[in-house]
Amino acid sequence: MTNIDRLTKKLDILADAAKYDVSCSSSGSNRKNAGGGLGNGHKSGICHTYTEDGRCVSLLKILLTNHCIFDCAYCVSRRSNDIERAAFTVDEVVSLTINFYRRNYIEGLFLSSGIFKDADFTMERLLRVVKKLRLEENFNGYIHLKTIPGASDELTREAGLYADRMSINLEMPTESGLKLLAPEKSHADVERPLGFVKDEIVRFKEERALIKSVPKFVPAGQSTQMVIGATPETDMEIMRTADRFYRDFSLKRVYYSGYVPISMDNRLPRIGSQPPLIRENRLYQTDWLMRFYGFHVNELLNESNPHLDIDIDPKLGWALRNLQFFPVDVNTAAYRQILRVPGIGVSSAKKIVQARQFGRLRIDQLKKMGVAYNRARFFIRCADGPYQLKDYQHTQIKSFILAESESKYLKSSVQQLALF
Amino acid sequence: MKIYLIDGSLESILCAVFEWFERKPGKVRLVRQSEYRPDAFSEILKIVNRRDSADRVWKGLKNKLPAVWMRRFYCTFLSELPEAPQLLFDFACYIFSAGKGTGGKNTAAAHAYRANDPENNYGHPAVLGIAQVAVKVEREKHRMEAFIRFKQLQNDRQEAQKGAMHSRDGLYYCVIEPDFNVIPLIAKHFRDRYADQCWLIYDLRRHYGIHYDLQNTQEVSLDREAERGLLKQAGTSAPEAETQHTELWRHYFRSTNIKARKNTKLFMRHVPKRYWRYLTEI
């Protein structure tokens, strides 16, 4: 076996093992290409290609090794799983990253690892890779590094000086779910290092404000990931956990990963069952509503409706439950109210509040600006909106909207009549 | 309706704006000279390009508009769409005739009045049109930043096989066929990012490219013969060392896919087929 074959084989194994980590964003860092070296950060990130499943590929996402001392039931690399094991050397990872980067294949490196020996040993090895990239190769591209829970503060702090983003996965949305599948782990193990890095980010930022030469520390912030559908949590529990982590640890992102069955373990969904893709989509929509649309998690999910609707999106669902806030007059209402109308997104809402300074807005103008008028028309008033005599019930509005919209999910279940 | 005949350059569009304000003839249609078919009913005026008039209009726009809108204006020109000259002309005329505007000034007072600047009137067809075309051009620019795939040109094959070749050496080249003329927009990105390697990005559709030689970027154009050679190089006949990297990349691309989540429709939306030709992994 030649060198290149061996490397190809390792890449196959360790990329395959890393793929269940859904985070692939390369945004949030504006690291400059210092001293005419290689690479820089792109503020909004760049997706260089997409896999067949429609997920973006912007980073070279690999494990340093898939040897692991833990035995978490939901993980492919668990100790008891009978799979091929491999490990990269530091030089191999560095050369792969540099050669891919120079050809504009990737935005940078996403490096994770199974835990071999102990946390410090693993973290130290990860640190060697990023240090070599930054210091010897003068590489200024994006680096996303996993914080290994249980590693010493010194190692974590040093890693933060070279990485753009750091993350630790929460794995299960609730403590009880985690205990069921990974008895050796707990949420507290994750919260401690998340909190440590968060405090360090704040400290470095304050010092940088005073002294310019203080280096950047994890400029793109931290993120985490939860596995959805492996354990029986409600959407409410999931989103409340997400909300708490956004607030307590100033996370940039929480990722929701629909569980892809990989194990015969009877605590988990069977191999071959479909990953919960629609549910995952609805959770992301809720996440966006919380971060960009000014919704509080309890408005979207609460004890009386702990699950998101599958057939309609959470924003429409909220509007139908709260018809007392509508109709909203786009020519007079506040930006925050316009933002809550189903069918109007952030960029159309901004255009509306700017454009109405110049005259009352009409339907055709709204349509041209990008408002989904067929959906929004039940909730707004504008200059030439039709006069509506009767108030519709929320069930009626829902059926009107569903009747004229094509769900991207339901398409296959609707049977077209055969012609002959 | 009056018709202004232009040659399609930015200068001619700006001169048309200058001309309109000289005579204020009401509604005007811009037509490229090459596309003009005479008819009996409309009056025509041939726009003569004058550098100083164009400069005055450009400066005037700069005083009126914030930097974002100047960029949108330029992007719309680069779109090369048939409706672009008319949009630019209508937009410029509207901006000059509507109110004072606070322009690029960034003072607190300017900020307070900015909401009333004419470029915020998205109800106006030219304003909305420019904003929407600019989004398309920026999207294409972003796609080129993502989908360009460099190949490394190796002069000395033996050296490469010995492994003496450093990843920095040798020209990194690629060919593209973007929908819009985005090379002027992407040059800075690649210069900043790949400051320590020589590279060449060549637009086959518009027959020109940019070359970076570690110091400057320069516009280059090749004759047809050389273009064919470049295309062939970019295709199958790459040197062995280069094939190793493309093979590794293909392997990575396959391994990182989750089969259970297959979603072809989403994939096609993100990577439309017209880009596949130059993508190494597909």
Image (cartoon, coloured by chain):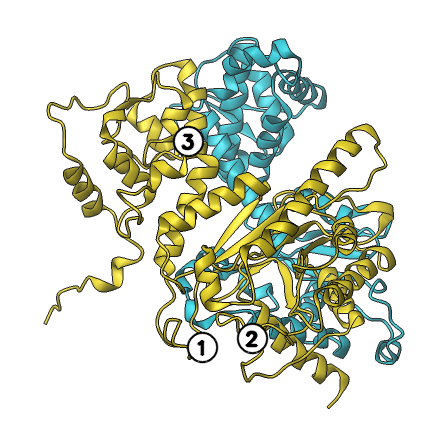
Task: Output the chain of dot 3.
Answer: A
- Image quarter (top left, top right, bottom left or bottom right) of the N terminus of chain B: top left
Q: Position of residue A157 (x, y in %)?
A: 76, 50
Location of mark 3 (residue): A348
Task: Output the chain of dot 1.
Answer: A
Q: Quadrant of residue A129?
A: bottom right
Q: Quadrant of residue B128?
A: top left
Would you say residue A70 is visible in this rendering? yes
Quick one: SS at disc 2? loop
Q: Residue at x 56, y 56 (%)?
A: A23
| Closer-to-camera residue (B231/A38) | A38
Would you say residue B80 is visible in this rendering? no
In the image: residue A210, left or right of residue A14: right
In the image: residue B16, left or right of residue A34: left
Are tags 3 and 2 found on a single chain? Answer: yes
Q: Earlier in the sequence, mark 3 or mark 2?
A: 2
| Closer-to-camera residue (A300/A401) | A300
Q: Earlier in the sequence, mark 3 or mark 1?
A: 1
Q: Is residue B3 above or below residue B199?
A: above
Q: Is residue B188 above or below residue B32?
A: below
In the image: residue B170, left or right of residue B79: right
Query: Which disc is residue A19 wearing?
Result: none
Are tags 2 and 1 found on a single chain? Answer: yes
Location of mark 1 (residue): A263
Which chain corresponds to the colour cyan? B
Q: Position of residue A306 (x, y in %)?
A: 31, 47
Location of mark 2 (residue): A78
Q: Is residue B22 above or below residue A201?
A: above
